Amino acid sequence: MTETLNIKVTKATSSKLAGVDFDNLPFGKTFSDHMLTADYADGEWKNFEILPFGDIGLSPAISALHYGQAFFEGLKAYKHADGKISVFRPEKNAARFNKSAERLCMPALPEEFFIQSIAAIVDMDRNWVPTKENYTLYIRPFMFATDPYLGVAPSSTYKFMVLLGPTGPYFSKNLKVKIETEYTRASEGGFGFAKAAGNYGGSMLPAKKAMEQGFDQLIWTDAKTHEYVEEMGAANVMFVIDGKLVTPSTRDTILNGVTRESIIQLAKDFGMEVEERRVSVKEVLEAIANGACTDAFGAGTAATIAQVAEIVHEGKTYTLPNPSESVFAVKMRKALDDIKYGRVEDVKGWNFVV
Ligand code: PLP
Ligand code: COI
């Protein structure tokens, strides 16, 4: 039987909503009025609480800060034309949350607690879900270790929190990307499949260098040979080659994206052939050069479908056909948005209505 969470609620005395410019919402900078917190101690999750968004007091010795026992999730809430609010496939994030927890030696959070926490905090701040097309309420659940202990050992206490922030599109243009062949995001036996904070910390230097070289993003390749494509920034990477949807198969170096999986299902519904397999850099570049590759894009919750205009490898530029004329990416973005914003019947049951 599903256990119903008892969540203590302390309402903010005033709302920041009126001061928010909903036409200008860069990703991750604006937070809603409330947040959710819970504690893990003595082998159980307790103290689920919604309270005004604000700073939290923590010991400077917490092991999350020193040894990186910390991970997160990312999902979005959408407002439908009739005012209904839904969250896209939260059960997928709940399951992945616990995959991350397991790999980082952290406690599982029962999936129903994850879902009920998100439902409660989104409901509390439902006025924060933007109405404008392509704008959403980003939901950021996360967990971190709170033992004030400098020994390298799993913490015995943890915090689970959920923050909310209205946001516009993560990328506003088609991307110029480089194939990364020096740095690595994840290696075999590591934790690339987890949404571990450390994966993102380690990606910042290569991303900064790529931007200094004039790129918007980079495509990660495998750690051993740099011959196979893995992901693109903080998104999965997908291509249309010879009319087939081609994407690297998930493995322990690749995050199993909810967007990726949803696109694969919809592509199959469109009657398209889908290949999930190792994808070599050589294959992609040759396919662009000879016109067989018509689409390259990143797929993720924050990124949505982020189309690639140019890929650079070893100083040579490979230009995709005009991304704004791409039949696949445009059609797929619309198909996904139509479901998320409730414009078509949700036949797959992907929308969790709050
Ligand atoms: N890969 C990485 C490294 C990510 O950070 C993300 C973003 O969450 C994704 C892929 C895409 O996953 P999802 O579609 O579940 O957001
Ligand atoms: C997401 O798409 O939710 C992500 O986690 C990407 C983020 C690191 C910006």
Image: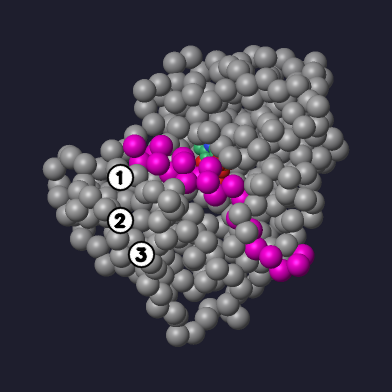
The Cα–Cα distance between marks 2 and 1, rounded to whole angstroms, is: 9 Å
Tell which circle, 1 or 3, labels the residue nearer the N-terminal end. Answer: 3
Give the side of residue 354 with respect to residue 334, left or right: left
Please give the residue where the numbered disc 2 appears in the rendered image.
45
Q: Residue at x 52, y 57 (%)?
A: 139
Please give the residue where the numbered disc 1 appears in the rendered image.
107
Residue 242 against residue 176 in the figure, above or below: above
The Cα–Cα distance between marks 2 and 3, rounded to whole angstroms, is: 8 Å
Q: Label 2 amino acid?
A: Trp
Residue in front for this viewpoint, 207 or 193: 193
Q: Residues within 10 Å of mark 1 (few under 14, many from 20)?
A: many
Give the side of residue 108 with respect to residue 232, left or right: left
Q: State which image quarter holds ligand 1.
A: top right
- Label 2 close to label 1 by CB (< 8 Å): yes
Q: Among all residues in the image, which is located at the extreme bottom? A: 13
Q: Label 3 amino acid?
A: Phe
Q: Label 1 amino acid?
A: Pro
Q: Residue at x 30, y 45 (%)?
A: 107
- Label 2 close to label 3 by CB (< 8 Å): yes
Which residues, given as a range, are shown in magenta? 81-102
